[in-house]
Amino acid sequence: MSLQYIDAGSRDDTTHQLSHLAARIKDLESAHDEMARVLKNLKVTAARIQNSRAPVSRLPSDVLSLIFEECHQSNPQWTGVLCLLGQLPIEVRLSHVSSQWREVALATPSLW
């Protein structure tokens, strides 16, 4: 009888330990997710600062828009070929360079 009691007691201890470990793992995973989110935000901020220092970032939006239109108009026949090759059209690729370029591209109706 005492052996059964010891076994039940050690099972309770093991169950308690597992429960404690599961809670600790959950806490650590939550902290990891939060740190990953913060790290991603820091990288995005650093990239924006780096992009803002590039000379092309100093171009006014209207000049950038004219450049985009010229790129778009320079080879319109390539649009179908690019799709066949699995590449995005030039206006989409330009809009993926930076948030500034995305804003300018989306605000340039002749691209679309």
Image (cartoon, helix red, strand yellow):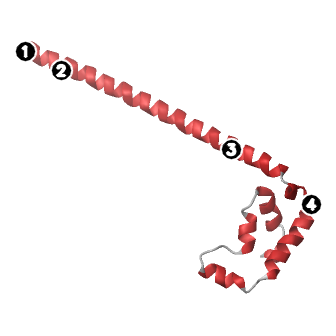
**Secondary structure found at label 4:** loop
Image quadrant containing the N terminus: top left
User: What amino acid type should be assigned to the residue bearing mark 1?
Assistant: Met
Q: Dot 4: within a 10 Å radius of its alpha carbon, few (fewer than 14), some, or many (20 or more) residues? A: few
User: What amino acid type should be assigned to the residue bearing mark 4?
Assistant: Pro
* Residue position marked by numbered label 2 in the rendering: 8
Who comes first in sequence, dot 1 or dot 4?
1
Give the label, 1 or 4, closer to the camera: 4
Q: Are marks 1 and 4 in contact (CB under 8 Å)?
A: no
* Residue position marked by numbered label 3 in the rendering: 43
Residue drawn where x is 83% and y is 53% of the image:
54
Q: Give the x, y percent position of residue 94.
A: 75, 67
Q: Based on the displayed image, in which of its 4 quarters is residue 3 positioned? A: top left
User: What amino acid type should be assigned to the residue bearing mark 2?
Assistant: Ala
Q: In this view, does 53 lie to the left or right of 86?
A: right
**Secondary structure found at label 1:** loop
In the image, residue 60 sits, relative to residue 87, either above or below, namely above
**Secondary structure found at label 2:** helix
Q: Residue 1 carries which label?
A: 1
User: What amino acid type should be assigned to the residue bearing mark 3?
Assistant: Lys
In the image, residue 29 sits, relative to residue 10, either above or below, namely below
Q: Distance between the residues labelled 2 and 4?
A: 76 Å
Q: Give the x, y percent position of residue 84.
A: 60, 82
Q: Residue 60 carries which label?
A: 4
Q: In terms of depth relative to the viewer, which is nearer, 22 or 57?
A: 57
Q: How far apart are marks 4 and 3 (CA)?
A: 26 Å
Q: Distance between the residues labelled 2 and 1?
A: 11 Å
